[in-house]
C-alpha cells in the first residue's frame, strides 16, 4: 500500500475516532499531495509523496519558529503535534554514521575531490536518501567530507 492510500485510510480512522489534530493534519497532507499531483499533471511515485511530506514537516518547523517569535505557545504545540503525525509516515531517519557512509560512497562514485563538485555528489546522493534525511543534513555532511 502506498503512502497516499495509507493516509486516506488513516484519515477515515481518525474521523471515526474523533481525533481532530490527526484528522486535520492528514487532510492537509492529502491536500498537499493532490496539489503536487495537479501541478505535475500525473500520478506521483512513493519518492515524490515522501518529498511532499518532508515539505509539510519543514513548513510546520518554520511555523513553530514564527509562533515562538510571536509568543503563541498554543500554535507551537499544535505544529509539534502535526509534525509527530507526519513523521509517522516517513521511513526511519538515518544515523549520522549511515549518512556519512552514503555520502562517502556518492563522493567515490562521482570521483569528487573538491567542494566545486558538491552539486554532482548531491545529485547522486539525494535519490538514495528517500526521505530518511533532509537535504540540509546531506549537504552539511558532503561539505564536511569534501573540505
Image (cartoon, grey):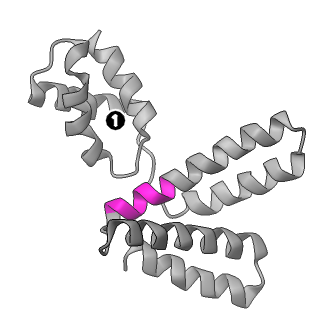
| Main secondary structure along the magenta-highlighted residues | helix
The quarter of the picture where residue 62 lies is top right
Quadrant, the C terminus = top left
Q: Is residue 27 above or below residue 100?
A: below
Residue nearest the observer in this picture, 116 or 20: 116
Does residue 9 show up magenta in the picture? no
Does residue 52 show up magenta in the picture? yes
Q: Is residue 10 above or below residue 109?
A: below
Residue at 39% over, 66% down = 39
Residue nearest the observer in this picture, 147 or 94: 147
Q: Is residue 10 left or right of residue 118?
A: right
Residue 91 in sight from this viewpoint? no
Q: Position of residue 76 (x, y in %)?
A: 80, 47
Q: Position of residue 43 (x, y in %)?
A: 31, 75
Label 1 sits on residue: 98
The quarter of the picture where residue 23 lies is bottom right
Q: Residue furthest top?
A: 147
Residue at 18% over, 25% down = 107
Q: Residue furthest bottom?
A: 16
Residue nearest the observer in this picture, 59 or 99: 59
Q: Give the magenta range.
A: 47-54
Q: Is residue 82 above or below residue 64?
A: below
Q: Position of residue 118 (x, y in %)?
A: 25, 23
Amino acid at each position: 500500500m502506498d503512502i497516499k492510500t495509507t493516509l486516506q485510510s488513516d484519515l477515515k480512522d481518525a474521523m471515526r475516532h474523533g481525533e481532530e489534530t490527526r484528522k486535520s493534519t492528514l487532510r492537509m497532507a492529502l491536500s498537499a499531495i493532490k496539489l503536487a499531483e495537479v501541478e505535475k499533471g500525473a500520478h506521483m511515485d512513493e519518492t515524490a509523496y515522501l518529498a511532499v511530506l518532508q515539505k509539510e514537516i519543514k513548513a510546520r518547523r518554520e511555523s513553530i519558529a514564527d509562533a515562538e517569535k510571536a509568543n503563541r505557545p498554543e500554535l507551537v504545540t499544535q505544529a509539534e503535534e502535526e509534525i509527530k503525525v507526519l513523521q509517522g509516515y516517513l521511513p526511519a531517519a538515518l544515523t549520522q554514521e549511515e549518512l556519512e557512509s552514503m555520502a562517502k560512497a556518492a563522493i567515490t562514485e562521482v570521483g569528487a575531490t573538491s567542494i566545486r563538485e558538491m552539486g554532482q555528489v548531491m545529485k547522486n546522493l539525494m535519490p538514495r536518501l528517500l526521505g530518511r534525511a533532509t537535504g540540509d543534513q546531506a549537504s552539511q555532511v558532503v561539505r564536511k567530507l569534501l573540505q
